[in-house]
Image (cartoon, grey):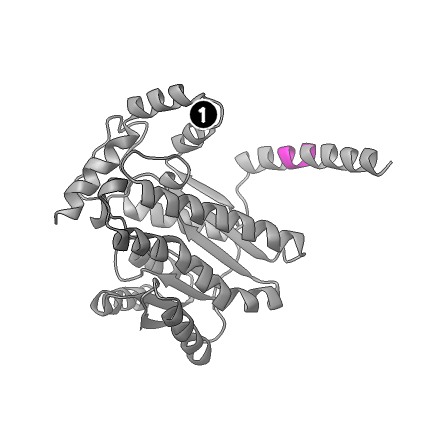
Amino acid sequence: MNFFLETIKVLLLSIWYNVESFIYFFVPKKKKNIAGEVVLITGAGSGIGRLMAQEFAAYSTVLVLWDINQEGMKETARLAKSNGASRVHYYICDCSDKNEVYRVADQVKREVGDVSILVNNAGIVTGKKFMDAPDSLIEKTMDVNIMAHFWTYKAFLPAMIANNHGHLVSIASSAGLIGVNGLADYCASKFAAVGFAESVGLELLATGKDGVKTTIVCPYFINTGMFDGCQTKWPKLLPILNPDYVAKKIIHAVLTDQVYLLLPRSMYLIAGLKNVLQWKLRYLFGRYMELAVEIDCHKRLSAH
């Protein structure tokens, strides 16, 4: 009887969730109010981190910026203040160092308060094929791109759980959904970031902490310094993304509690095809779309 009732429950909820999704396709979700929320952004000294800080500032949030580039953070702080941030605090923090993450996190909690929106944005890429990548660079990639997420969650998630309020934002990559030739360590770190964020999100729901939201962002190439020189064979289908556009979409996803944000929209189709195509077809399709062009871009980047 329990199996029968559980099955009926799942079927009815499945229908409702699909109807709900269909409605939201035409009727935009109401945006939540984040004025006064404490927003911590890692890798905030430049690129998408800086742009997200400016976007969050417009909603009168309290910003906490982390980076290893102090001058970059100073400029981000200036721009955020001019854009309406309630307060801006910035700290030098090497997110690859667990002890430093914990130390600076404690300082933030003392000086600013509990973080309610955590944006794990800091990331690096070696741009080398697996056998050519030194062990130290592989370890650094994993430490920054995924292990830092563990330590920041450990530091700031307890307060969110206690209040049943908060938002965890993981800036991953389309390389966290589809393997890319020549980016084994980077893909591994981004696959891990996606899996980690998904798992923690499910864990929160299972324990009744549905007030702590999760947003996982998986963009294609973004036109920032990290991807200088990148080109795409099919710009209409897979364009190089404008960083301002990406930052605005991320903030919109947070405001509407969107769990997955894939950019451009064609990535939803491509990621779906990956799960139904057999291996040789996936390789053929990937070559056709020139997803492997990333490695050429990063080779140029690594020479800068």
> In which quarter of the view is residue 184 placed?
top left
Q: Residue at point 31% right, 66% down?
A: 94
Can you give x and y, in whole percent of width and height, for residue 37 in the image? 48, 66
Give the residue furthest to the left: 304
Can you give x and y, in whole percent of width and height, for residue 118 in the image? 45, 61
Question: Could you tell me the amino acid type at mark 1?
Answer: Leu
What predominant SS class does the magenta segment belong to?
helix
Q: Mark 1 points at which residue?
A: 273
The residue nearer to you, when weighing 83 against 233, is 233
> In which quarter of the view is residue 4 placed?
top right
> Would you say residue 182 is visible in this rendering?
yes
Can you give x and y, in whole percent of width and height, for residue 23 in the image? 59, 35
Q: Seen in the image, is 221 located left or right of residue 151? A: left
Q: Residue at point 34% right, 60% down?
A: 53
Give the residue furthest to the bottom: 110
The residue nearer to you, when weighing 12 against 28, is 12
Can you give x and y, in whole percent of width and height, for residue 152 in the image? 44, 63
Looking at the picture, does residue 48 appear above or below residue 165? above
Task: Assign the N terminus to one quadrant of the image.
Answer: top right
Crowding at label 1, few (<14), some or many (≥20) Cα neighbours within 10 Å?
some
Give the residue furthest to the right: 1
> Would you say residue 57 is visible in this rendering?
no
> In which quarter of the view is residue 12 placed?
top right
The residue nearer to you, when weighing 294 against 98, is 98
> What kind of element bears circle 1?
helix
Residue numbers of the magenta segment: 15-19
